[in-house]
Amino acid sequence: MIRKRIAFWLCLFTMCINTWSCKKFLDQVPDDRITIEEVFQKKQASEQYLANVYSYIMDSEGNQWDANPWTTTCDEIQDSWTSHACTKINLGVISSGNVPFAKWAHYYKGIRSASYFINHIDGNKEILALNGQQLIDQYKAEARCLRAWFYFCLMRQYGPVVLLGENEIDVNAKDIQLPRSSFDECVAFVSSELDAAAVILPNVPSRNGQQSDLEYGRMTKGIALAIKSRLLLYAASPLYNGNTDYAGYTNTDGKVLISQTYSQAKWEAAAKAALAVIQMGLYNLYKAPGGDPVTSYRNILLEPWNVETIFARPANNLWDWENHCNLRSAGGWNGMSPTQEMVDAYFMADGKSIRESSTYNENGFTNGVYNMYLNREPRFYASVTYNRSEWQGGALTTPTTVDLSYSGRDGKKDGKEDYSHTGYLSRKNLHPGSNRLTNSFVSRPYVMIRLGEIYLNYAEALNEYDPGNADIAKYLNLIRERAGIPQYGSPGLPVPAGKEAMREKIKAERRIELAFETHRWFDIRRWKILEQTVNGALHGMNVDGDSDDFYKRTTITNRVYRKAYYWFPVEQTELDRARLVVQAPGW
């Protein structure tokens, strides 16, 4: 497998540690170190500074238990270890004084670093001498796009945030007191930043106008427009668009932070933003040679820099995800366990839900396999390891029948904490060639935005402002066609009639297509369905049972719902410094 790298990532080193001091790059002892002013007169040093700005993109999303909560604190996955930080959220034992997954300070450091670069790179003598103004403008656009991404990451987690504009200041400094801007103001600013960056950024990763595989991972026009698509989709959604539940969410001066007036125009803007990415014509839905739907869907994330990838992170910790997903007998830790609710969400092979399809059967076995798992759609088989399925990977060099029952090879009896709590494991983004026992992992980028998401963004937004538009079913069906299931409008599967019916089909498709890709956590919040999805019991198979006793729907956890969970709290230590920043509601 060809591994494409970014050369400048290898240049990161400790000279970037103090870049946000705005005084010196490093202390001037010994005197052969250069000042921050000198950094921006040198090409290599400036590029190293920009590489440091890139480093604030979170490269730890392979860790969904201690570093990120996006899959293990929604209704997708139950992880196996009670010591992990996600358990605190699931049990409701967090507060503003005890916040796991806190990223407020991290992203503001990235924002400040990006702003400093933008404000100081102009006039770089070495770049001007070698490359002219074009490269400086591109580098500034990259930093602008990165800064917009950092703001978006703050907004999706914390809601309205503090906007700093072009100022390279520390939002938490005691002598700098700024309040939150309204969410709409945040959206307007970040959207304008992405537009400005998109005008300058290249269509394909390049430097000096020359495309190179070594540049993959750098900001492009497509990435800027794709971030805008997601940003505007969130902004149009019920959590932010006329949400009267938060009429009392105000700054200390009474400024309302969440729009109280519904705007149809927000959905139109979101649809146009997604269509802009599509109309670039640079990306396509990935299909494996031969078109097998299981292989096609699996390899979206396994085949590096394929035609569907828009935004990906070369530096990542996918090896950690693989360790936690893989079977114990294959060298893994049996830890990432899809819930029964997630399993039930997958369609049948006829393209219908388990409630609609006449082929769904939750009784008996066929050739030793529980009938619940037969005749399911291809994405199910590419994403979920279930009992009596086959797996080959890691230490299992030949196809092996999975046994997750109590006394099974990978069951609870001999597993200590390393056993599936639901009777399932995730196999999505799990490369069969990786093996923890031999310390060999198949390197690949971590995909953050892909075209399949953009199609679903477009369909959802278009349905809200122009229901009945033919493009809604068209782009939904393109996703289904690649997935190997019948399209809406085919015999026995009519196009959903009306906005509400189509909305539910789009939500169902999104849940399946983007499963375990860190979308669900944000989707159930922006749709305002948190209470219906993570409030009370989640289920799995009976992992304390063998034989037929294993195949019983069993409550595996009771999640705690709090309305405050729509946003993370800002850590109290940060609020003590930033005294004008009000806490999120409920904290």
Image: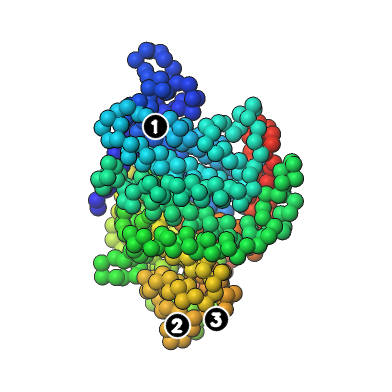
- 232 and 216: which one is in front? 232
Q: Disc 2 designates what residue?
A: 489
Q: Are marks 2 and 1 in contact (CB under 8 Å)?
A: no
Residue drawn 35% across the image and 65% down it: 285
Mark 1 or 3 closer to N-term? 1
Q: Disc 1 designates what residue?
A: 122
* Residue 90 versus residue 528 in the image, above or below: above
Residue 539 horizontal side relative to residue 45, left or right:
right
Q: Residues within 10 Å of mark 3 (few under 14, many from 20)?
A: few
Mark 2 or 3 closer to N-term? 2
The quadrant of the rendering that contains the C terminus is top right
Q: Amino acid at mark 1?
A: Asp
Residue drawn 31% across the image and 66% down it: 287
* Residue 315 versus residue 539 in the image, above or below: above
Element type at marker 2? loop
Q: Nearer the viewer, mark 2 or mark 1?
A: 1
Gap in angstroms between the C-alphas marked 2 and 1: 55 Å
Element type at marker 3? loop
- Report which quarter residue 376 is drawn in: bottom left
Q: Are marks 2 and 3 in contact (CB under 8 Å)?
A: no
Q: Residues within 10 Å of mark 2 (few under 14, many from 20)?
A: few
Picture coordinates of residue 60 (x, y %)?
Answer: 45, 44
Element type at marker 1? loop
Q: Amino acid at mark 3?
A: Ala
Q: Amino acid at mark 2?
A: Gly
Q: Disc 3 designates what residue?
A: 497
